[in-house]
């Protein structure tokens, strides 16, 4: 997550590694492709900027997860906050995925995308009564409950609609995931989950509530985890809890958080993660749920942008592109690194530049002090690893319509979300009569 400066040599190394690594976005005769479609062709057809996803990459990741955990009963509940495009959800659902949702809106999208309610789990510290009732009516598998008040509210909601809620208590295992503080969730000081020491008393309380059935436990310690160590630490703590006397559960939700390669990171893949934790998971006798988001979609997507101008000041050279922080906020918000590739590969000299958008904020950048080959106005750039928390976190800041999403499957591309229009910018607004 930390911003890095690369020397030309390092840049070349990571550039080459990236090509080898991401087989779904290869260069063919110096042109960047998504599977078998030239990125430039799509840019000419539909204009820039746009998000571009590879169906093959999405399928490969979900299948890798399914295979890695095939020796235990399991549900891969894709954390749809990472990318909630209906087509992405539908594609993953067809491969057997369930989803992890965090709002009534996500429930709506998941059902619309055809995800079976028996494979839906809901998380979040602030579920409203309305959201609880919607999820109960839909018949979802599990509520990950994060506090005593929420448990009591869920009991009341279930009573009012004549249902019994299946609950997994979300435990805060107090394990440091060693990631960016904004995306650490399993530390004592974070707002998430129930303190380890309060879980058994809450379980007992739940036993006295008529419309609650505690059938599981859940933990999620953070996102973009690049080693298995914190996973193992959390799993061990949870395993001890599961073995406690009188604690009888069927489902163990181990959360999400597996990191991806944005730059020089070498995170474990799902198979390596599984190898490390499966013995403990199996010994529990539980059905396993997991909630990966980023590791399924991040490297299946890129953001394609066109250079508008270049500008050299006394201090820096800026590459001004047509995508901005409203399209991809990760660099501004977390100082996140996203590799940037020219869509037409060239042999030009390398220089150190800031890649910035047109938004009126100094925080509007996609890369800072980045060493990359010289680029010219009108050329196309690909912001790599943008499939997760990209469009999902986009906004209309500076009255910029949100960009379209394109899915490539082999030699075909499909527009799966159209570009927003000027009319979309005023949808729902109304100037009060008294001003007329
Ligand atoms: N389960 C729970 C309860 C979560 O809170 C999250 C992510 C996940 C699963 C999925 O985690 P993943 O596998 O994607 O790491 N916007 C940030 C990431 C925020 C993650 C929030 N929770 C970013 O762009 O890095």
Image (cartoon, rainbow, N blue to C red):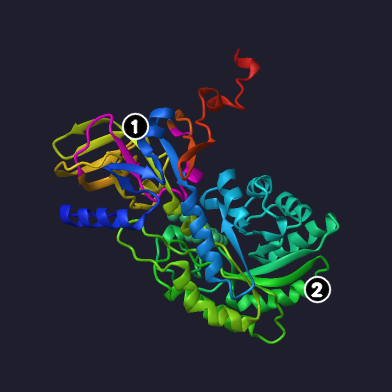
Whether residue 175 is visible to the viewer of this picture, yes or no, is no
Give the x, y percent position of residue 327: 43, 39
Query: Is residue 395 shown in magenta?
Result: yes
What residue occupies the far bottom of the structure in this picture? 245
Which residues fall within the magenta stretch? 373-397
Left or right of residue 201: residue 226: left
Q: Which mark is residue 208?
A: 2
Structural distance between the alpha carbons of marks 1 and 2: 58 Å
Location of residue 160 (image quadrant) = bottom right
Nearest the viewer among 85 and 361 is: 85
Q: Is mark 2 within 8 Å of ligand 1?
A: no
What residue occupies the far top of the structure in this picture? 436
Give the x, y percent position of residue 103: 64, 50
Q: Report the number of numbered marks.
A: 2
Q: Quadrant of the N terminus?
A: bottom left
Query: Is residue 193 shown in magenta?
Result: no
Residue appearing at x 42%, y 76% in the figure:
229
Give the x, y percent position of residue 196: 58, 76
Residue appearing at x 52%, y 70% in the figure:
68
Left or right of residue 279: residue 343: left
Provide the residue designation for mark 1. Answer: 358
- Sequence order check: which comes first, mark 1 or mark 2? 2
Determine whether the residue tagged by mark 2 lies in a helix, strand or loop: loop
Cβ atoms at labels 1 and 2 below 8 Å apart? no
What residue occupies the far right of the structure in this picture? 162
Left or right of residue 241: residue 45: left
């Amino acid at each position: 997550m930390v911003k890095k400066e690369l020397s030309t040599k390092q840049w070349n190394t990571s550039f080459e590694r990236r090509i080898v690594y991401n087989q779904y976005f290869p260069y063919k005769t110096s042109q960047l492709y998504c599977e078998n479609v030239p990125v430039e062709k799509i840019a000419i057809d539909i204009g820039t900027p746009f998000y571009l996803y590879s169906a093959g990459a999405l399928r490969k990741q979900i299948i890798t997860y399914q295979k890695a955990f095939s020796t235990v009963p399991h549900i891969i509940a894709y954390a749809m906050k990472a990318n909630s495009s209906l087509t992405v959800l539908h594609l993953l659902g067809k491969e057997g995925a369930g989803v992890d949702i965090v709002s009534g809106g996500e429930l709506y999208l998941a059902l619309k995308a055809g995800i079976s309610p028996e494979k839906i789990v809901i998380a979040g510290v602030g579920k409203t009564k309305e959201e609880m009732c919607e999820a109960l009516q839909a018949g979802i598998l599990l509520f990950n409950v994060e506090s005593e008040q929420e448990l009591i509210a869920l009991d009341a909601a279930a009573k009012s609609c004549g249902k019994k809620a299946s609950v997994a208590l979300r435990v805060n295992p107090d394990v440091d995931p060693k990631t960016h503080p904004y995306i650490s969730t399993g530390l004592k000081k974070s707002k998430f989950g129930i303190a380890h020491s309060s879980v058994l008393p809450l379980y007992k309380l739940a036993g006295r509530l008529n419309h609650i059935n505690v059938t599981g436990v859940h933990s999620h310690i953070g996102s973009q985890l690049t080693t298995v160590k914190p996973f193992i630490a959390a799993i061990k703590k949870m395993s001890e809890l599961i073995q406690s006397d009188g604690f009888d559960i069927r489902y163990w939700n181990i959360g999400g958080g597996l990191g991806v390669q944005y730059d020089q990171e070498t995170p474990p893949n799902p198979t390596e993660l599984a190898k490390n934790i499966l013995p403990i998971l199996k010994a529990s006798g539980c059905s396993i749920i997991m909630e990966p988001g980023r590791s399924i979609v991040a490297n299946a997507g890129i953001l394609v942008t066109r250079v508008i101008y270049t500008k050299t000041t006394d201090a820096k050279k800026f590459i001004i592109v047509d995508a901005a922080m409203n399209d991809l906020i990760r660099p501004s918000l977390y100082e996140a690194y996203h590799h940037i590739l020219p869509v037409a590969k060239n042999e030009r000299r390398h220089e150190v530049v800031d890649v910035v958008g047109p938004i009126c904020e100094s925080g509007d950048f996609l890369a800072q002090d980045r060493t990359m080959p010289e680029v010219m106005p009108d050329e196309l750039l690909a912001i790599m690893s943008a499939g997760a928390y990209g469009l999902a976190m986009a906004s209309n800041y500076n009255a910029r319509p949100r960009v379209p999403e394109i899915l490539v499957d082999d030699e075909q591309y499909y527009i799966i979300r159209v570009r927003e229009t000027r009319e979309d910018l005023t949808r729902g607004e109304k100037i009060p009569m008294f001003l007329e």
